[in-house]
Amino acid sequence: MKRLTLCLALLAIFLALPAWAQIYNIGGKEVTMDGFFRQEFLFNVNSNSDYNTNQTGFHGAYQMWLLDTNLAWNDNLEFRGIFRMWGDLAYYMLENNHHWEHFYGGSERQLAWDTQWDQIVRELYVTYATDKFLFRAGKQQIGWGEADGLRLMDVINPLDARRMFQFYDTEGYEEVRIPKLIIKTEFYPGNLWKFYDTAVELYWNPGDIKEFGDLLPPHLDAHQRPWAEYADKYGFAPFGNVPWPNDMGNHWGAWAPPTPTAPVPVRLFKQERATAIENSEFGTRIKINIWSTFITLNYWQGFDTSDHEIIKSHLAGGLGPGGGVLHIDELGYNPITLGMFGAPVAAWFDRVWPRMRVAGFTLSRELFGVGPMFCQNANPVLRMEGLYSFDQTFNTEENTYLMTDAGPLPISLFNTVKRDQIRYMVGFDWAMQIPWNPKKSTFVSGQFFHIYTRGNSGPYNLLQLAPYDWAWPKNQFYMTWLMKTEYMNERVCPSVLYVQDFHTRSFWIKSKLDFKIGDHWRPQIGYLLIGPNQNRTRYIAGFPYPVRDNYESFGLFHDRDTAWLRIQYQF
Amino acid sequence: MIKEKRMLWLMTLTIFCVFFIGVTFPANCWQTKDPQLAEDFAKMLGFKVKDKVGKVAPEIKPGMVIDGNNYKQYPGLVELLPKSLYDRLDPKSYAPLAPIKVKETDQYHLGRRYLENSLKSAKTAKIAADGLTLEGYCGGYPFINPKNGVELAQWANKQYLGDTFAMRPMRLRLYGKDNKPERELRQHLNCYRFMYRNDWGPDFIEPNPEKIEYIVSGTFIYPKDISGTSYVRKRYVPADKSDEFLLFVASMRRIRRMSGRDTQDPLFGSDLVWDDYNTFWQKLSTKDFPMEYKMLPPREMLLPTFIDYDWPNDRASAGYTDYKVDESGEQCYLHYGTWQRRWVYPCEMVSKDPSYCYSKRVWVAEPEICAGVQTDMYDQSGRLWRSWVRDYNLSQTGVGIMEELIDIVDVINHHRTILDFKGHKDPLWMGPEYADVRFLSKKAK
């Protein structure tokens, strides 16, 4: 009730804001303020999956309140604060829905509303800028890179993937990057040799490490109700039916990656990282222009902010009561399954938080003369981005033997190895005259990605997302294709982004219609189509039958095709 | 006693009237504050505009008000207004004109350095062998008395809006088919000139290895969905070097390079395209969208009167309450306080490239300030597409000039954009840090 009252009060304030929104004077200081209120309704158009990994029909009602403020103390000094409340009303609207409560109700505490202070005070920083240097300190996000749809150089802030996972086009990343406390300085040497407009940026994060919680899907994270998943799948358990753990406090909701077969509960051990100097992160970026080409050279040394986590089998204790190991082995000698008739056991993992070191570049250049060759008014703009990741940590699945009193026991363990990886993207932006819209050009953007993992030829599979079987190939290719235009003087703006994973042949297409009604209303309708990977059967050594429904890459979300309606009021 | 009271009232009324006339009216008309400079300017040009006008439709006199009800009583108006504006006197037309109050013709002028640089250029400036490029230009008028279309096109190319200006803000007010408000966008716009400066500081900002003539940078502040979007656009002197355009996309928190050749698309759903900025902003080129330039006979035209105010005033607080955008009625009216006869130089620019958005543009130059005041653009099938009319905010010392109110009407699609400005003329605090990546870094937040 209190929350509802608060929401209504905020709504009243927000609706009153247009009268005084924007720039006004407080005590002789210029203060700007704007923001929006947004309500989205999401509908899953797939039928219920065999594994109960989706919520058919209405499955999300995201609500967001955002207030963006800036105080210009003088020409040099500014303070900025971005405050946000983000929640999902589906947890209230679906509270009588058995399927929802059964499988997603447990994430309500984490996903119904973001109530932590560092979630509400999203960004807060001070900027001091002169014509020689810029200094900015505080909680902020840094957007490196040139790529849309997929992230390469955008490595500094981790992403909050709980809602809509990471299916973002040119917009969206700004809202889900998790800001960090960063001190940024930028110096302007001016023109050097043939370089012009040069700048050197230095970054230091004094140990503010952000994550968005336990990334294990809820089905796997059932450690508080041992045997619950087993009971759910098979209808019984050794100790009778076990209620599904709906108080587990997991961070995943309806956008959880689906669960691979896990007949036993899984427990993830992780050590929270505090803000500490030994957790510092560093980076630098050099910006230069030469021959009408804008180039950045980037280096970052920090914690891995990839969209997956690295886990390791937890080897504490032994087999049996109170201890426990293990991942399900591939050979059928499954100690946990064998132990079903004994005390409850779980597969235990430790979370590994690897550091990363990347060096890379971005480049953009207008391709002069190309436009006229294709009867186009505008030239395309070439965009490139590449990075070298040193000693990147990968998960592996390793078959080995555990020495026990009864002799060696074959087991399968998750472990880590380090490999170098090269990632690059080549793409273009082009405002093209296309006959379907003679009044306005259509923005067309194509990108090609190649990810090469050095040394990926050993005995181990490098897993993309443990504990899934999905492995890194030596060469991974993606492409994206974005088109957007506008009609009726930008009152109607259609756009579509297509992303293809060539390795697994999975894809996703995000199409949207944005409407601009007056200064304040920005409704949107959209549809996200996710195509599964084509080869979904896999043979495992020692097993005569193939594993079916082996989803990989975007295909993990193939049962999450979603239509949505967004209503946004901005001021 | 009664007589004394009457005298007292009369005196009070007189004082009030003197105050009203003395304070309010002078602010409402443009009158030079440097008569000697005005004379020198007229000497350089060889004429005063006010001496040239009055021959066409002499029945239209200062003090008259022309509106949709009486305009047909003045057949000479057809000759005093371009057809695009004359047609808008019809109350049934799309975006009809507000009543035109006619006043006497003023004599405008720019600053002393502008005059001196014009005289220098007169000795050195010439059209290069390619038939278009300007060589030997030192600032001021490229050609004081243009003799042909190419020389007049160089006026369009070298229009002067001060060494610096800062719009706080520039408002793009969009109107739909019913001529009612549709949306509004606002940006903070900066202009910083590196070469051919005339108002303050050195003539040329050094070092300038890129040969930047001037830059335009800006940050959108409204509405929220584009707020924070910032850009730097560099205009280079070399004719074969197109603009450099860097954009900070706030919704991505990234800097993106855009094509400097992408100049024909409307901005954010408005009727403003880069090539039309300031009535004409197309990069003159013999290769990219070449044009044929033809000087049409100079003519008389009724045009809005310039005004003069500066930051922190806006036009209302400076006394120009009759210059306004009135959205209170059935449809929107843009009121220029007064209009006056001007002697103008029209230039017909015909596109040689059928892929260009316009087949033809008629650009109308004001000879006393070397800037465009009205322009009509035609689509590739020859229909009138967009029409501009505008005033300027010109300092009465001649030093400092700025955008003011611009009326853009799309007569084919029935859409309208009014550009409405407030800002600083020649702000001394603006430096080259507004012209490069430093600006984007500061705004990249």
Image: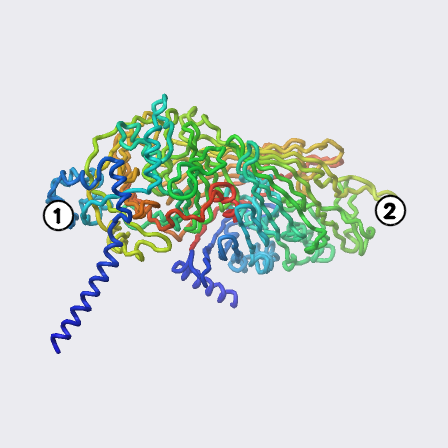
Instruction: Describe the element under mark 1 as helix, strand or loop.
Output: loop
Nearest the viewer among A400 and A419 is A419
Label 1 resides on the chain identified as B
Residue at 54% x, 58% y is A91
Instruction: Describe the element under mark 2 as helix, strand or loop.
Output: strand
Q: Percent from the top left, x then y, of residue A399?
A: 78, 39
* Residue under label 1: B70
Residue A433: name its quadrant.
top left
Decide: marks 2, 1 in contact (CB < 8 A)?
A: no
Examine the rendering and report whether any part of residue A178 can be seen: yes
Q: Percent from the top left, x then y, of residue A485?
A: 41, 38
Which quadrant of the figure contains the C terminus of chain A? bottom left
Q: CA distance from mark 2 to mark 1?
A: 107 Å
Label 2 resides on the chain identified as A
Examine the rendering and report whether any part of residue A235 can be seen: no
Q: Is residue A103 above or below residue A432?
A: below
Q: Residue furthest top?
A: B129
Q: Percent from the top left, x then y, of residue A534?
A: 59, 34
Residue A423: name its quadrant.
top right
* Residue under label 2: A404
Nearest the viewer among B353 and A548 is B353
Q: Is residue A447 above or below residue B32?
A: above
Q: Residues within 10 Å of mark 1 (few under 14, many from 20)?
A: few
Nearest the viewer among A446 and B217 is B217
- The amino acid marked with disc number 2 is Thr
Nearest the viewer among A312 and B227 is B227
Q: Percent from the top left, x then y, of residue A231?
A: 68, 53
